[in-house]
Image: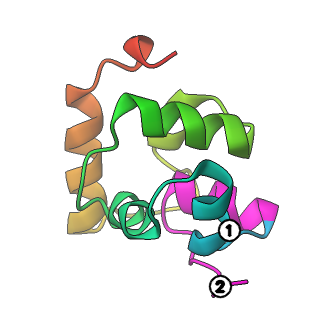
Amino acid sequence: MGKPYFAHTNLGIAMVRKGWSVSDLSFETRINPRYIGYYLKGEKQMPPDHLRKIAQILRVDPRDIFQTTTEMSTLTPHQDHLRAQREKIKLRDYA
């Protein structure tokens, strides 16, 4: 089992709630752990097939992965970048 990822995104929060690391999610979804790390950091936009796999495995609505977390009081530049990406994505296409 790999090191747990800190929950600063909704994806990270969902992973922590299941007690999963990047390695665990990678194993379950068959998605390269490097890409999961990119998604957690907002360095790459998640393609629809990865979003569906991750949401299904974590048992969350795909839209929840991109919604703003209420636990955060301010947005870091990284989170602001994620928010901007979210606005460009048509989530109904992923459902």
Q: Which residue is mark 2?
A: 2
Please tell me which residue is depicted at 51% across the width and 29% down the height of the picture.
Answer: 63
Q: Quick one: label 2, few (<14), some, or many (20+) residues within 10 Å?
A: few
Give the amino acid at mark 2: Gly
Q: Quick one: label 1, few (<14), some, or many (20+) residues within 10 Å?
A: some
Answer left or right for 22 relative to 34: right
Please tell me which residue is depicted at 34% across the width and 43% down the height of the picture.
Answer: 46
Percent x, y of residue 47: 33, 36
Give the amino acid at mark 1: Asp
The vertical placement of 49 against 30, above or below, is above
Q: Which residue is mark 1?
A: 24
Percent x, y of residue 90: 31, 18
Contact, mark 1 vs mark 2 (Cβ under 8 Å): yes
Q: Assess whether residue 19 is covered by the magenta stretch.
A: no
Q: Secondary structure at mark 2?
A: loop
Answer left or right for 46 relative to 78: right
Which segment is the magenta one? 1-18
Between marks 1 and 2, how big is the CA–CA gap? Answer: 7 Å
Q: Secondary structure at mark 1?
A: helix
Q: Assess whether residue 13 is covered by the magenta stretch.
A: yes
Q: How is the image coloured?
A: rainbow
Please tell me which residue is depicted at 38% across the width and 70% down the height of the picture.
Answer: 34
